[in-house]
Amino acid sequence: MAPLIHRVDAKPGCSRIAVSNGVAWFTGHVSAKQEPTLREQAASVFARYEELFALHGLCKENILHCTAYVRDIAEFPGFMDAWNAWVDRENPPALVLAQAPTGGAAYLLELSFLVAAPETLT
């Protein structure tokens, strides 16, 4: 029997969140404000994820994994400063940071999370 999959904000080609077997898989998010530094964009995206977590009854201590795509890996220290200020230090998730094109010169970062979630996530 196939696992139950719940999709949130499904649109043609993509869902904002897919939930299965107690894990919420988030699509990637970028900073809406396109701040000038990676550290500022990271803080902005973290704030957006906090809004999404609150909306869906999730919390950052239940983050299992984060994938961070940065335009320039040389900016790694700025990301890590923002990450360490935001992440739950008692429950740090796995983190992958990779250099990759991010959809336009103004976007310095794209983040995606996997979060332990109740099957009732709506």
Image: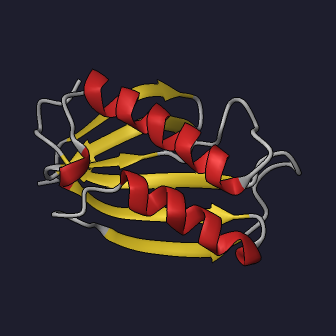
The spot of residue 10 in percent (x, y) is 46, 27
Q: Quadrant of the N terminus?
A: bottom left
Left or right of 9? Residue 63 is left
Nearer the observer, 117 or 30: 30
Left or right of 99? Residue 5 is left
Tell me the quarter of the picture where residue 29 sits. top right
Q: Residue at x 48, y 64 (%)?
A: 67
Please determine whether, in this image, residue 82 is positioned above or below residue 53: below
The spot of residue 58 in percent (x, y) is 21, 37
Q: Residue at x 54, y 44 (%)?
A: 43
Q: How is the image coloured?
A: secondary structure
The spot of residue 21 in percent (x, y) is 14, 53
Q: Quadrant of the C terminus?
A: top left
Left or right of 11? Residue 40 is right
Please determine whether, in this image, residue 77 is positioned above or below residue 23: below
Tell me the quarter of the picture where residue 9 sits. top left
Please determine whether, in this image, residue 2 is positioned above or below residue 9: below
The spot of residue 100 in percent (x, y) is 73, 69
Left or right of 79? Residue 122 is left
Nearer the observer, 40 or 33: 40
Q: Residue at x 41, y 72 (%)?
A: 95
Q: Residue at x 29, y 22 (%)?
A: 55
Q: Residue furthest right?
A: 105
